[in-house]
Amino acid sequence: MLYDDQNIFARIIRNEIPAIKVYEDDQVLAFMDIMPQAEGHTLVIPKTPAITLLDLPPDAAAYTIQIVQKIAKAMEKALEVKGIVLMQLSGASAGQTVPHVHFHLVPTSLHNLGKHAAQMGDQEKIKALAEKIKAAL
Ligand code: 5GP
């Protein structure tokens, strides 16, 4: 499958559509999920155009995981949560809906996860959670 550079995350990377960002550098972007499965649900994406984890060059994967860890630590501190679900869906057959590789950080238990990409969150509440995570980075 060819990478579609019009996918929603590619457009977020290019600032063509807005996102509530918590972290950005030249290689990685972290932003809040618009349909959170728990309060604080954050997505971490490499800027490298890759559809799944299997397409991502190992160096980019390694760096992205460093940022995943950094965000997870900030999340624990800022949101006062103990456990975080790290989820990565590779391929539509696995349930992946956006064809740009991403890591979900969901500060909850696997047993309390909300439905996947199902319901828009309260954007003001999400912005406030993002501010807390940013402040703890
Ligand atoms: P996937 O199913 O590909 O693993 O996850 C895609 C995630 O992106 C879902 O959790 C969904 O809620 C989220 N999402 C879909 N469209 C947008 C969007 O336009 N902005 C943001 N911030 N998240 C989105």
Image (cartoon, helix red, strand yellow):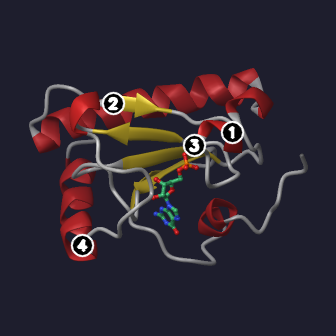
On the image, the x and y values in percent for residue 60 come to: 68, 31
Q: Amino acid at mark 3?
A: His
Disc 3, ligand 1: is the CB inside 8 Å? yes
Q: Nearer the viewer, mark 2 or mark 1?
A: 1
- Asked if residue 109 shows in the view, the reply is no
Task: Give the structural element (helix, strand or loop) at label 1.
Answer: helix
Task: Give the spatial CA distance, label 4 vs label 3.
Answer: 22 Å
Answer with mark 1 or mark 4, whichever residue precedes in sequence. Answer: 1
Answer with mark 3 or mark 2, whichever residue precedes in sequence. Answer: 2
* Residue where numbered disc 1 is placed: 93
| Residue 109 horizontal side relative to residue 47, left or right | left
Q: Amino acid at mark 4?
A: Asp
| Residue 24 horizontal side relative to residue 39, left or right | right
Task: Give the spatial CA distance, label 1 vs label 4.
Answer: 29 Å
Task: Give the structural element (helix, strand or loop) at label 2.
Answer: strand
Sort mark 4 into few (<14), some (14-19) or many (20+) by Cα contacts within 10 Å. Answer: few
Residue visible at 56% across and 32% down? 64
Residue visible at 39% across and 66% down? 20
- Asked if residue 54 shows in the view, the reply is yes
* Residue where numbered disc 4 is placed: 122
Front residue of this view, candidates 15 and 103: 103
On the image, the x and y values in percent for residue 111 come to: 24, 31
Q: Amino acid at mark 1?
A: Ser
Q: Nearer the viewer, mark 3 or mark 1?
A: 1
* Residue where numbered disc 2 is placed: 85
Answer with mark 4 or mark 2, whichever residue precedes in sequence. Answer: 2
Circle 3/circle 2 CB separation < 8 Å:
no
* Residue where numbered disc 3 is placed: 102
